[in-house]
Image (cartoon, rainbow, N blue to C red):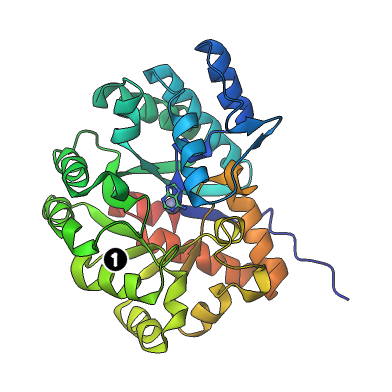
Amino acid sequence: MTAPFNTAPVPKAELHCHIEGAASPALVKAQAGKYNTDVSGFISGDSYVWSDFTEFLTAYDGAASLFRSEEDYALLARTYLEGIAAQNAIYAEIFVSPDHAAAAGLSHTAYFDGLAEGIRQASESSGIECRMIIVGVRHLGAEKVEAAAKLAASRPHPLITGFGMAGEERFGEVAEFARAFDIARDAGLGITIHAGELAGAESVRDALDHIRPSRIGHGVRAIEDGALVQRIADEGVVLEVCPGSNLALNVYPEISSHPFDRLRRAGVKVTLSSDDPPHFASSVGREYQMAADAWGYGAPDLTDFTRTAIEAAFVDPQTRAKLL
Ligand code: ADE
Ligand code: ZN
């Protein structure tokens, strides 16, 4: 038997990480101490506690409610980015949710300035590059998602380069959100949307038809429709695949049934991300290692995923050229 390939030195990039979902239970507990709040409803010891997607969202919202100032968000962004830089990540895009910040009583300016300060500090200490993607939350409805798109389109910070939508994929019809994405696209933002995670191939097809994204968050359930897989490959749409998240949320029972490698072999552009790392016992480093262990990838394959991510990144040409 050959020894497992050690992915630690491989340069990595992730395009799909929700910043509020990147807060470790230890950091959230420290925040709870700061604000004299109880987190026993969704954290036990060193772990988040939830058993399905709805409960996961409750834990996510609970953690987010404890980041209430510019400094809190600077600390969160810096901690997350320095952590993955230590795993040789060179680039990350974080989903940022103005609705979560507003619910915690934070102004948009304080939210973006805090995150940008954390990004600046991490970049200074480790060299990692990071951009922000504003997301609307699907289950809050089309009006809220459109407000998030308008905010993104106003270009509130230079590090905000994309717009997306997260949340409960089974809520509403994707066509209801098309106007929000048009607003963001017209403002020159990169476009991505969660689809094909909690719902099947039809959801991915609808997202392609109505939203016309260059990337799809997850997208893995496209595998249920061969013609759709072919379309994704032909159109060069990039999938932000998060295998650890899919296993934790029971989209697939085990890594051997996960379609990442089948999608790749079908010519789909695939990348690897952690989604909400501490919720799923994940990190970009773990995703690369898990993929290498499951499908026998070596340095050339893994470097290819990183290159695909950088090529699909919502970043200016000079930064892209520096990273490639
Ligand atoms: N928000 C945070 N994580 C998410 C996920 N995995 N799917 C949809 N929305 C999310
Ligand atoms: Zn996600």
Q: Amino acid at mark 1?
A: Ser
Seen in the image, is 73 located left or right of residue 38?
left
Seen in the image, is 78 located left or right of residue 27?
left
Seen in the image, is 189 located left or right of residue 278?
left
Residue at the far bottom: name it: 227
User: In front: 7, or 115?
Assistant: 115
Q: Residue at x 45, y 73 (%)?
A: 221
Q: Is residue 323 above or below residue 58?
A: below
Q: Residue at x 23, y 47 (%)?
A: 141
Q: Residue at x 31, y 48 (%)?
A: 139
- Residue 49 placed where, x, y %? 62, 39
Q: Residue at x 50, y 30 (%)?
A: 63
Work out which quarter of the rendered image holds the C terminus and state it. bottom left
Q: Inspect this view and state whether residue 206 appears.
A: yes
Could you tell me which secondary element the residue under label 1 belongs to? Answer: loop
Q: Is residue 202 above or below residue 8?
A: below
Residue at the far right: name it: 1
Q: Is residue 214 above or below residue 152?
A: below
- Residue 301 placed where, x, y %? 59, 72
- Residue 234 placed where, x, y %? 33, 84
Q: Inspect this view and state whether residue 297 appears.
A: no
Q: Residue 243 appears in which quarter of the rendering? A: bottom right
Work out which quarter of the rendered image holds the N terminus and state it. bottom right
User: In front: 201, or 123?
Assistant: 201
Q: Residue 178 appears in which quarter of the rendering? A: bottom left
Count all numbered tags in the image, as a single digit. 1
Residue pointed to by mark 1: 214
